[in-house]
Amino acid sequence: MRRSIAAAATLIATLVACGGSDGGGDAAGPTQNTGSGATAEPGGEQSADATPSSSQSPVGKLGDTLRLEGLADNLDTAGTVQADITLKRYEDHAQPSLDIFAPSDGNRLVAVEFTIVNTGTGTYSDLANQGTNVIDSTGQEHAAKPGDPTVGESMGVNILLRPGKQTTGWVIVDVPKDAKITAVTYQMDATGVDKERTGTWNLN
């Protein structure tokens, strides 16, 4: 009889213990979810050099570094196309190094200096002047053109950067003589309007 009572008591204790374990498991669920959220949180922060989101274009100011993405099918080698691009300097009244680069009548030259670092796993091949624009106070965009300013060395027409490599140089733009330039944009693989491939640097 005593053995039966002892066995019953043991069974009850075991059931209670199992019930406590289930409760603890339910409590652990949110803790695990919180842990996953905390791990993902840095990737969700919005900053000048954050990974781009398809919902908005990266935006910064003069001196900021923006991370942009290129087209996956525009690779010389397999991998991803991604770059950290810094707008280093802006020249509002640039001078051409040769007369052939001079602005047309009624226009003036402006120049922007970029540093581009290939942070992807594939080769970044592009045309620097094709992806560069400046925007004036009326919202009008003005496209860059090939040429060298006297302020520094040109970026060159063709960009070819392997992973980890970088380049720095100037790009020139013809704008109306009285235009007030408010922003600079750069688009990797300049086709279409994919926001994650276009960075904007506000000058004001």
Image (cartoon, grey):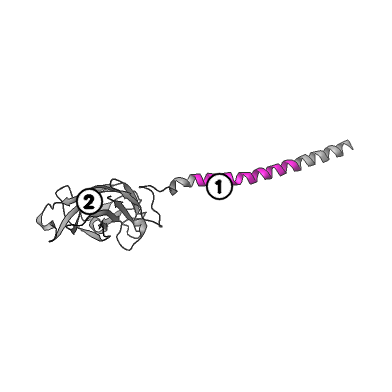
Please, what secondary structure does the residue beneath circle 1 have? helix
Q: Position of residue 30 (x, y in %)?
A: 59, 46
Q: Residue at x 67, y 44 (%)?
A: 23
The mark that comes first in sequence, 2 or 1, is 1
| Magenta stretch secondary structure, dominant | helix
Residue farthest to the top, as pictured: 2
Q: CA distance from mark 2 to mark 1?
A: 46 Å
Determine if the magenta segment contains residue 118: no
Q: Position of residue 131 (x, y in %)?
A: 27, 57
Please, what secondary structure does the residue beneath circle 2 have? strand
**Does 120 appear above or below 2?**
below
Q: Quadrant of the N terminus?
A: top right
Q: Which residues are magenta?
A: 15-38
Q: Is residue 106 left or right of residue 34?
A: left
Marking on residue 15 = none
Between marks 2 and 1 in the image, the one whose residue lies nearer the viewer: 2
Q: Residue at x 83, y 41 (%)?
A: 8
Q: Position of residue 139 (x, y in %)?
A: 28, 60
Per the image, the residue denoted by label 2 is: 112
User: For residue 55, what is the image quadrant?
Assistant: bottom left
- Note whether residue 65 is visible: yes
Marking on residue 33 = 1
- Note whether residue 163 is visible: no
Q: Position of residue 118 (x, y in %)?
A: 31, 49
For the residue carrying disc 2, how many other residues have a C-alpha within 10 Å: few (<14), some (14-19), or many (20+)?
Answer: many
Q: Is residue 113 left or right of residue 6?
A: left
Q: Residue at x 25, y 48 (%)?
A: 167
The kind of residue on which mark 1 rests is Asn
Q: Which of 183/151 is in front?
A: 183
Tag 2–tag 1 contact (CB < 8 Å): no
**Does 154 appear above or below 139?**
above
